[in-house]
Image (cartoon, helix red, strand yellow):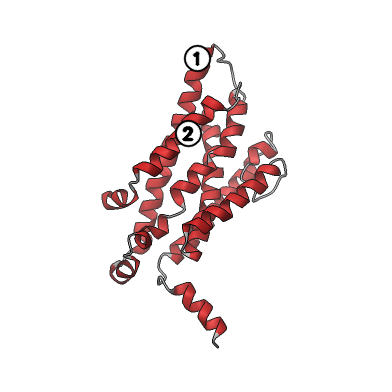
Amino acid sequence: MKYEFKILYSPIKWISCLILVILIPLVMYVPTYFDFVNVSSIYMPFVGIVLFSDINLLYKESHTEEIMYLTNKKPIKFFVERYLITVALLIIFVIVENIIFRIIQQFQGEVSAEPISIINAIAIVIGGCLFVSAISMTISTIFSNVYIGYGFSGIFWLYWNINCQTESIINPFPFIANPTFYEKHLVLIYIITVGLILVNCFLCTRSPFYFGDKIRKCFYR
């Protein structure tokens, strides 16, 4: 686990995410916790995209993917460890964001009873983050290019940002679509995310040339 943490450690990436986390409650107009959860649900997925997209490509970035494929006997174990570390980091960011919002409320004297608990709020925000980031991570791994993952997930986010009030099992913002009955869609988002994680577990066991070989076989049969 310590080794995987060292591989994941990226001060520039983590500081960039922290800056966004701090700016959301500071810059956005969020007079109530309800508004804060809505805004956080929309913008926190960017943190997830940055943190998760290259989890399966870390060895490629260091040009050691072929060596690791030949020598690493437990690729799924190492992938899961990296994923869990990143999930823990994401949860910390969401908690920090909530603390900053509460501090701002205290200074402004606007603390009031809210219709949603902090646990539910964190589950809502984390659900959307993990879903969008799992899509980005999967696309990045398939194409072996993190920027394609960024682009695809960015377009996906933009589409659902425009259509955020449409109820759908792939809408990463179920709380915005239906604040009263969002639980079902939120659970489905978590289930789909688990499915995408399993896909990535499979992909991390494949050769770095797996998809290239498949494409060549399609064209040169």
Whether residue 61 appears in this view of the structure is yes
Where is residue 92? Give x, y as percent. Answer: 41, 36
Specify the quadrant of the image occupied by residue 209: bottom left
Can you give x and y, in whole percent of width and height, for residue 79 in the image? 38, 57
* Mark number, residue 18: none
Residue at the spot 71% in from the left edge and 40% down from the top edge: 165
Decide: is 83 above or below 96: below
In the current view of this chain or complex, which residue is farthest to the top? 109
Check disc 2 and report its element: helix, strand or loop: helix
Circle 1 packing at 10 Å, graded few (<14), some (14-19), many (20+), is few
Mark 1 and mark 2: Cα distance apart in space: 19 Å
Residue under numbered circle 1: 106
Residue 28 place in picture, x, y as percent = 58, 28
Going 56% across and 81% down the picture, which residue do you hit? Answer: 218
Q: Residue at x 61, y 33 (%)?
A: 38
Identified by mark 1, the residue type is Gln
Q: Do we see residue 192 in this rendering?
A: no
Position of 69 compared to 156: left or right?
Answer: left
User: Badge 2 is on which residue?
Assistant: 21
* Residue 127 sits above or below residue 101 on the image: below
